[in-house]
Amino acid sequence: MDKIKNAVFNTGPFIHLKEINCLKLLNLFEKIIISNEVFEEYDSETKNEIKKHKNIFIINLNSKTKDLSKYLIEQYNIHLGEATSIALSKQENIKLFFTDDLDAREIAKLSGIEVHGTLAIITRSLKENIIDKKETIKIIKDLHENSSLYITKDLINWILEKINKYKQ
């Protein structure tokens, strides 16, 4: 299994995986980095859950990175969590960022950061044999029906078609 070495997360992917009881998929990563500002956005139950994961690290921003975060908020009108995550990616020189926020995705791409979301975590977990095809399909349906992540039915149908064709 090829774990992903380093990635920055904002709040969305962790919350969406938690909502469908799939935090085990975080084992796909050797190291998940979140900003202290993102950590503070979670409720106390979620904070406790994060602390249980030995591969999640909370990093403070340096002053230069805080300035970049402020700039991103002012320039692009994004939230603090997204701005600090993008800035943290730059600070730590991590080229992989996980978010489900469309605006944050676009801004991160402009900054030269590779961006993926919760669906990518699920499908990569299939590829790395953390879950099998049957469980992947169940998780994706559950994500669509029982999480706060907005996903169109067309996207769900497209991804399920791709998964059904996948040779495991």
Image (spheres, grey):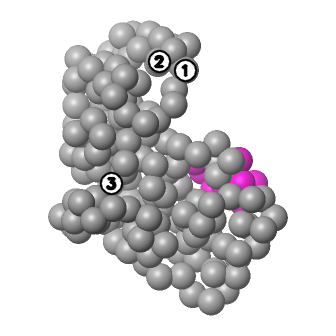
Q: Which mark is residue 29?
A: 3
Could you tell me which quadrant the C terminus lies in? Answer: top left
| Of residues 43 and 134, the one drawn nearer to the viewer in this rendering | 43
Residue at 41 percent across and 71 percent down: it is: 40
Seen from this angle, which residue lies furthest bottom?
Answer: 63
Residue 91 falls left or right of residue 59: right
Q: Residue furthest front?
A: 43
Q: Is residue 145 above or below residue 58?
A: above
Residue identifier under label 2: 156
Q: Amino acid at mark 1?
A: Thr
Q: Is residue 76 among the parts visible in the rendering?
A: yes
| Residue 116 % position (x, y) | 53, 43
Mark positioned earlier in the residue sequence (3 or 2): 3
The local secondary structure at tag 1 comes to loop
**Residue displayed at 38% across by 42% down:** 16
Q: Nearest to the eye among marks 3 and 2: give it.
A: 2
Contact (Cβ within 8 Å) of mark 1 with mark 2? yes
Towards the viewer: 157 or 152: 152
Tell me if residue 67 is in the magenta stretch.
no
Q: Nearer the viewer, residue 133 or 59?
A: 59
- Residue 139 percent coordinates (x, y): 29, 26
Q: Nearer the viewer, mark 1 or mark 3?
A: 1
Taking the magenta stretch, the answer to whether it contains residue 110 is: yes
| Magenta residue span | 106-115
- In the displayed orientation, state which residue is furthest to the left: 52
- Residue 152 — which label? 1
Q: Residue at x 44, y 64 (%)?
A: 41
State the quadrant of the N terminus: top left
Q: Quadrant of residue 30?
A: bottom left
Under tag 3, what secondary structure? strand
- Give the Cα distance between marks 1 and 3: 27 Å
